[in-house]
């Protein structure tokens, strides 16, 4: 396995000492934001994890290996490659590794890397889910499948805003994935704090850690969603978000954008339509999730040591 | 694991001696019937298992543990708590355990408890399935997922009557779950003996036991549905059931009932609309399934000893 | 396990010596072609595997056992039994074994047999997938589930032509199954070389072998689709195929054909509607897949030895 998985010495050391580590994804670096904002954000997210008392482990595929923990020049290199990097989900991982291609990891692939490395906590922006129109297209993100499968806790501000949230929650329920509202009984909606849909309320990182501990001790494999609403001060106006999403979706249809290209396109359109405020919100919520992820990682270590 | 799983000494003793045990769910106790009918029924079901030559193991979550096998005062306590207890599916189990909340187990969570305890046979009333309208709502019971995953044989009078039965059977087929008609080549319809849909006919508990034995010996993990039609004498008139379901579904829509509240609401409406006969039928079929479950448990022990 | 799984000595010997083996399905023998064309084709496919430098292992259920590797009289016996044999998917396997019934294995059941025997490469004609109209019927082949679950590489000319290909590819993506285009970046359409949908291009058996090796070494369980287009010379005219499929589907609806009977019916109608050319194409593509399967099996052995 070692030949295809490289764990950064700092991460390996923390794991060996049972110290808190937080996994981070790299698609935001390559496909989620323009250069150099992407690299700058990745650094701020890593710094937020460190301030939270944990070691950051950004995950990507470089030189035929899953790298768990990137150096600063890896961050820069990926940030410059940008959309030319492959955007890797479960199905793409072995192909990219075998062909020696550079790639960034989606939520699904990051969960795989985190689980392989033994990191139970992962902070991201938004998870994938059921796409609008999936009743006819059957387009459902592999992230949901991975949440049912890999034993990683994903701290997120909700599913990406352009998805069908009720269907996404139904699939998570069917697949047995706990969806915990962090300090709230409402499932958040990424740019806004309340989707109008319910979540199971938990209060504080210790409560999350206890749930994770019980779940995995009992052999109930699979992931957990910690739905952490964007901070009030950073949240966008729900009406603005709603009409921007509608317009962006309309444009995606008009341009015939499909598959893995949809999310990057929509994020870009959202940014234009909100005058850049969606990008600011996106950065703020990722950093917020990194902090909460660190707190959960610390609480879980405390419980297990 | 022991800290979150408590196996009643009588059950543990039977399992250690490789004697037949039948798992039973507890949602019927908290959400399926009014007090005190629920407790009375639970006792009769346990008695039916004993008369069938097996040890009953009703499963619930109490005091932060999955309890496999309840004492009579546990039954009473849960029966009084009623709908204030959490109704636990796979996603809820670790939360209820970590928070120390009382909960009853659905088919999915009972399968989990049974598998953890090493009990391969479980008798219930009706399994969950694909909800009517799921082509738009994506509302599919976690019971189907669990049947694909946990190696437990579930003896049932069919899927709950208000579900979409053709879609439910399609999902079970896709997921590789055997659906065996116990003495019939028709999938039963809970209150009635024939849904008009096919099942793979098996004759007798020994045949079921042989199938289970082969399946799990080959490493083909996952559950088996034994579809056991309600006894002729207890079955309702299909025309009466059909119109009562339509009316109950209409009322659920009118009242905006959704999610986990749908089944209890519909059962209650069915009872009113059939003048209490649906409740009698429900009791009769659970007891019948308990008897058949005992016979299968005995046959499987005979085969394995 | 041995009591329900019989591995032909020639196959067992090759596996023990880490020599290339290619698994083959048997539904084409019982349900895919008329007698004696079916037996003749099965022999030609086995011969193609041998010419390709591997040992063929046709899989079926006979005398209460999964047989991995058939003798010539087994082939003949199954070919004569024809449609009276059970057509076995995952859910049917334990039933057929326990009841001692003869059965042929679909893609799903063949993958199970291959994985149990330790054969990572399997060549077939077309895999199952999402049926047209599945947005309402929920009719999805268990083959897709098996591809998500069993670690076997399936060489195929695409999904069966009568399926909904875009939905089939979406489900495979969601479930994390790599779909590799063998020498092409287009997903083939069984009788024709290009469905208009994308596949991840790979070039040569060595590249496939490297991907398989990495995938399974990393513990990324589950199957891989190698989509190998029908040879140019054998491909049918897309317009002819299109109208024949439409007509055959119309007839299936008119005759009320459903479930597992659909594919055999459609293949037969296609044959009549194309004046037998669809059958010739079917034979040609299976033999082509057998050759490519052998090359991949050889490359994988070379990599692992
Ligand atoms: Mn998709
Ligand atoms: Mn539901
Ligand atoms: Mn089907």
Image (tube, coloured by chain):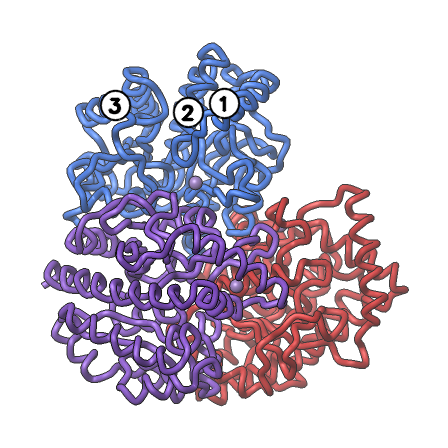
Chain colours: A blue, B red, C purple
Between C187 and A136, the one nearer to me in the picture: C187
CA neighbours of label 1 inside 10 A, class few (<14), some (14 to 19), many (20+): some
SS of the residue under disc 1: helix
Between B35 and A28, the one nearer to me in the picture: A28
CA neighbours of label 2 inside 10 A, class few (<14), some (14 to 19), many (20+): some
Mark 2, residue position: A265
SS of the residue under disc 3: helix
Spatial CA distance of label 2 from label 1 is 9 Å
Q: Marks 2 and 1: which is nearer the front?
A: 1
Quadrant in the rendering for residue B161: bottom right
Quadrant in the rendering for residue A302: top left
Spatial CA distance of label 3 from label 1 is 27 Å
Q: Are marks 2 and 1 in contact (CB under 8 Å)?
A: yes
Q: Which mark is residue A79?
A: 3
Spatial CA distance of label 3 from label 2 is 17 Å
In the picture, the quarter occupied by the N terminus of chain B is bottom left
Question: Residue, x 59% and y 64% (percent of image)?
Answer: B169
- Residue extending farthest to the top is A275
């Amino acid at each position: 396995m070692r030949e295809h998985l490289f764990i950064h010495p700092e991460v390996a050391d923390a794991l060996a000492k049972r110290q808190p580590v937080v996994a981070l994804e790299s698609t935001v670096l390559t496909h989620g934001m323009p250069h150099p904002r992407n690299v700058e954000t990745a650094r701020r997210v890593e710094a937020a994890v460190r301030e939270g008392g944990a070691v950051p482990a950004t995950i990507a595929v470089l030189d035929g290996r899953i790298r768990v923990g990137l150096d600063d020049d890896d961050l820069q290199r990926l940030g410059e490659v940008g959309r030319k990097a492959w955007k890797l989900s479960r199905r793409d991982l072995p192909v990219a590794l075998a062909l020696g291609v550079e790639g960034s990891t989606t939520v699904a692939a990051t969960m795989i890397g985190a689980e392989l490395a033994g990191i139970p906590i992962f902070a991201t922006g938004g998870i994938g889910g059921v796409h609008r129109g999936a009743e006819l297209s059957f387009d459902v993100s592999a992230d949901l499948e991975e949440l049912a499968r890999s034993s990683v806790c994903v701290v997120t501000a909700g599913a990406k805003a352009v998805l069908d949230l009720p269907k996404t929650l139904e699939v998570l329920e069917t697949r047995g994935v706990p969806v915990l509202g962090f300090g709230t009984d409402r499932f958040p909606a990424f740019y806004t704090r309340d989707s109008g849909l319910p979540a199971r309320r938990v209060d504080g990182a210790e409560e999350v850690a206890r749930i994770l501990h019980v779940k995995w001790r009992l052999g109930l494999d699979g992931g957990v969603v910690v739905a952490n609403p964007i901070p009030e001060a950073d949240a966008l106006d729900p009406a603005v978000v709603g009409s921007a999403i509608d317009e962006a979706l309309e444009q995606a249809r008009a341009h015939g954008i499909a598959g893995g290209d949809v999310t990057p396109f929509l994020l870009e359109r959202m940014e234009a339509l909100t005058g850049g405020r969606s990008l600011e919100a996106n950065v703020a919520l990722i950093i917020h999730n990194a902090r909460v992820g660190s707190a959960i990682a610390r609480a879980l270590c405390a419980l297990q040591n």
